[in-house]
Image: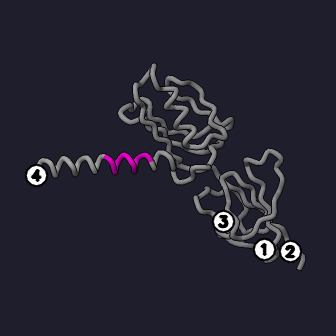
Amino acid sequence: MKFMQARGFVALLVILLAQFSGSVYAQGGGMSEYTLGSGDVIRILVYGEDDLSVESQLSDAGTLSYPFLGELQLLGLTVGELQNKITQGLLGDYLIDPKVSVTILEYRQFYINGEVEKPGGFPFQPGLTIRKAVSLAEGFTERASKKNIFVVSDNDPTSTPRRVELNSPVQPGDSITIEQSFF
């Protein structure tokens, strides 16, 4: 009887672990829509295959050299798309059932300029807002306009500035400009 209970417990544990690991794979660090870009530092793990596990920063061109698969173009891919790309590349010729996990270790920087005390580039953090970005830049100057704030997104091919508010989200690679107030 105890053997059956233990066996049931192990089966339940395996199911829970499988569901948990599946959700971690899908989230890839909690930002499933996040697209990779140059400057991101990622970790690729292939379970049971230490030679295929890599930690690296994406090049300026958004590429990464990966064992057996060569130079991979990662610019614009989500974590899930990258996991699928590597899984499909390793499937068959190299491995029967590769278990690939991709994690973002360090996001690319965002930039803030204009009427802040310390303009420059800062490490992105998930959940970052304009208000928090200004805090990282040591606050507004006396002449700062809290209503004339513009962002140019890294993934906008037209580089069109868009007006944002203090609670607007910031994405990696964004360039934030704080304008002067006239009064």
Q: Which mark is residue 2?
A: 4
The Cα atoms of the two marked residues, 3 and 4, are separated by 54 Å
The question of residue 3 being in magenta is answered with: no
Q: State which quadrant residue 79 falls in.
A: top right
**If you read the primary sequence from the N terminus, does the residue marked by circle 3 or circle 4 appear first?**
4
Viewer-proximal residue among 152 and 15:
15
Residue marked by disc 3: 129
Mark closer to the chain start, 4 or 2: 4
Q: Are marks 3 and 4 in contact (CB under 8 Å)?
A: no
Name the spot of residue 86 as percent of width and height, x first. Answer: 52, 31
**Circle 1: element type:** strand
The reply to whether the C-beta atoms of the residues labelled 2 and 3 are less than 8 Å apart is no
Q: How many marks?
A: 4
Foreground pick, 16 / 106: 16
> Callout 4: helix, strand or loop?
helix
First to last magenta residue range: 15-22
Secondary structure that dominates the magenta span: helix
Q: Earlier in the sequence, mark 2 or mark 1?
A: 1
Asked if marks 1 and 3 touch (Cβ < 8 Å), the reply is no
Query: Which comes before the other along the chain, label 2 or label 3?
Result: 3
